[in-house]
Image: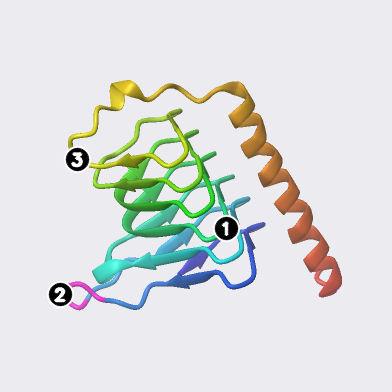
Amino acid sequence: MIIEDNVFVGPYAVIRADEVDEAGEMEPVIIMRDTNIQDGVVIHSRSGAAVIIGERTSIAHRSIVHGPCEVGDDVFIGFNSVVFRTSIGRGCVIRHNCVVDGLDLPKNFHVPPMSNIGPGFDLNCISQVLPEYSAFSESVVSANHALVHGYKKLANEL
């Protein structure tokens, strides 16, 4: 497991890379800098598959990111959402209670609340991310950076 600088991992989050593939190998879970993993999130690598979470990404409460999976930079994954067997492009916003399984999302897509996206889904019916959703995502990242700073200060790490 690799967790880069300035990453916030909330209470009750679970990050596991404990299964190997058929050859006995395992890819790491990588969480890049300035990202926040909020309360109750589960990140799990299935059968040794890679899980990569990009920079400045927010994964909201009780979401699941299950490998194989790659989540790009500046992505927001909303409450209770699940991403599995997919690549999520830079700048995507996945709202609450969504499932994205087995279909890659290009950059800057907005997935409406309670959407279920998988093989055969027509991505042409999904709009680009609206500016207000990008701004919200940036505010979440900023708020969680303040938490990282505060926790480090409490632990005398600054």
Q: Residues within 10 Å of mark 1 (few under 14, many from 20)?
A: many
Residue 50 disc label: none
Residue to which mark 2 is pinned: 23
Between discs 3 and 2, the one toward the N terminus? 2
Write down the region rendered in magenta.
20-24
Q: How many marks?
A: 3
Q: Is 140 positioned to the left or the right of 13 in the image?
A: right
Secondary structure under tag 1 reads loop
- Residue 141 drawn at (x, y percent): 66, 45
Residue type at the position of mark 2: Ala
- Residue 107 drawn at (x, y percent): 41, 30
Q: Is 101 positioned to the left or the right of 111 in the image?
A: left
Q: Main secondary structure of the magenta part?
A: loop
Between discs 1 and 3, the one toward the N terminus? 1
Query: Of 93 and 112, which appears nearest the observer?
Result: 112
Q: Can residue 158 be seen from the camera position used here?
A: no
Residue to which mark 1 is pinned: 61
- Residue 114 drawn at (x, y percent): 43, 42
Disc 1 and disc 3 in contact, CB within 8 angstroms: no
Residue extending furthest front? Answer: 114
Query: Of 77 and 46, which appears nearest the observer?
Result: 77
Using the numbered discs, state the Cα–Cα distance from disc 1 to disc 3 in whole angstroms: 26 Å
Using the numbered discs, state the Cα–Cα distance from disc 3 to disc 2 in whole angstroms: 28 Å
Q: Is 105 positioned to the left or the right of 142 in the image?
A: left
Q: Does 128 sit above or below residue 36? A: above
Residue under the point 64% across and 65% down: 10
Residue to which mark 3 is pinned: 119
Residue under the point 50% across and 72% down: 14
Mark closer to the observer (3, 2): 3
Disc 2 and disc 1 in contact, CB within 8 angstroms: no
